[in-house]
Image (cartoon, rainbow, N blue to C red):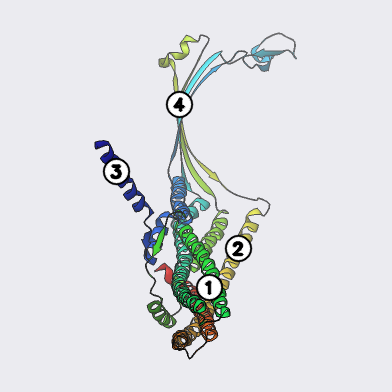
Amino acid sequence: MKHILSLIFTAFIVHAAVAQEAAPQKLSLQDCMDYAVQNNYTVKNAQLDILIQQAQNAQTAALAYPKVNGKAEFDYFTRPQSQFLNARTFGGPSAPDAIVAFAFSVPFAGSTSISASQLIFDGSALVALQARKMALELAQQNARATVDNIKYNIFKAYFALAVGYRQRDLLAKSLGTVRTMLYDLDALNKSGFAEKIDVERSNVQINNLQNDSASLENGIKLYEYALKYTIGMDIKKPISITDTALDSHTMSSARLLLETDSYERVPEYTVLTTVKSLLEYNVKRYKLAALPSLAAFANLGTNYGSDKFADIWKFRHYESNSLIGLQLNVPIFNGFVRQNQVKEAKLNVQKAQNNIDNLKSGIDFMAAQARATLKNSLLQLKSQTENLNLATEVVDLAQKKYKAGVGSNLEVTTAQAELLKTQNTYFSTLLNIINAEGDLRKALGMFNR
């Protein structure tokens, strides 16, 4: 008995765990955007780019720090190199051309040293140090632009999914109505009060609605996959969106038409302006490369040599040495390389300005087009909503007439087909509003707020 109770309890726990695991995660639009900032791989890489730039800035800052190196060396000359001298130098043989070979080095030698250097002035290094902050700003701006694009894609995918949900509900309602009518027609046909053609006509309509429903369901799954992929979620994980009040959303869309344009709010614009500023630093760097560079250096060391290997390790015999100095490097002529580098850098600045101007034109065009589309679609939605209500009323009226015996099945079928057509037009207009609103928000830089 205890064994049976244990199995029942275990089965209950497993069933509860599976049910909990299968429960879809409810997501608002803001939830999706917050999730994407933490989990989207493109956003993660953009954040890593900031850390990479910080590491590169630290490397650049090292140019201003002194460099210190230590060195220890042991040498064993198995066959020391000889030097050649005229024997007369040492009062040797009387032959005037006698050449004598001498090995001045001893077989064993050791040395230790510590060297230090400090860059005092270098034009290129100075510009690199000045540009560090702006380079980090560029990485941060690129990250914001990445997040902006992700939010733009999330916005469109999310509300396209919301439209799909709404369309599925209405289609399911229409399908239920037609099935109910088919059931009644079939009963009437068997009783001899309805023609076979009316039953077949309803069957055709049901098949069409089922095909439309299956196609829509596949489309909804694709929208869900796209949304989950965009936010960085496992596409197998079930979700359910909560911001599905499309009517109130379209009302807020109209207020978007009153928003003013501002290039500075658009992340891509700030990225390009920063790129231009960095390229101007490049011009400055090549110009300052014509100036001399100055560095200080110092060296402290010891060395010793002996005929015996054991003596090398007696450090008390080592002799010390030291030096300090300044090194001035003066560029004189390099084949006009620097002049052409300056020319190339200036041309790149001009290209950057062209890119900025082109982006501004693109933003203006995108905003104007989105405003026109949004305004027109909102006007269409008003009439399409009225048409949808009228088409629904026509279907209800046709069904009542048919049940009262004063209408035909063909009249009901025609009204339902017209309702389906009106619904498709209505939802197409809704999608146009969503896409236009997303484009306008993108052009106004509103996803970056």
Residue lying furthest front: 191
Q: Is residue 4 visible?
A: yes
* Numbered label attached to residue 342: none
Dot 1 corresponds to which residue?
A: 206
The amino acid pointed to by label 1 is: Ile
Marks 4/2: CA–CA distance: 49 Å
Residue 291 vs 96, above or below: the answer is: below
Dot 3 corresponds to which residue?
A: 8
| N-terminal-most mark, 4 or 2 | 4
| N-terminal-most mark, 3 or 4 | 3
Which part of the image, by quadrant, shows the N terminus? top left
Whether the residues at callouts 4 and 2 have beta carbons within 8 Å, the answer is: no
| N-terminal-most mark, 3 or 1 | 3
| N-terminal-most mark, 2 or 1 | 1
Residue 196 vs 49, above or below: the answer is: below
Dot 4 corresponds to which residue?
A: 301
Q: Secondary structure at mark 3?
A: helix
Residue 261 vs 408, above or below: the answer is: above
Q: Badge 4: few (under 14), some or many (20 or more) residues near its Cα, within 10 Å?
A: some
x 68%, y 9%: residue: 92
Residue 349, image x, y percentages: 58, 65
The amino acid pointed to by label 3 is: Ile
Residue 78, image x, y percentages: 60, 13
Dot 2 corresponds to which residue?
A: 348
| N-terminal-most mark, 3 or 2 | 3
Residue 447, image quadrant: bottom left
Q: Nearer the viewer, residue 385 or 60?
A: 385
Marks 3/2: CA–CA distance: 75 Å
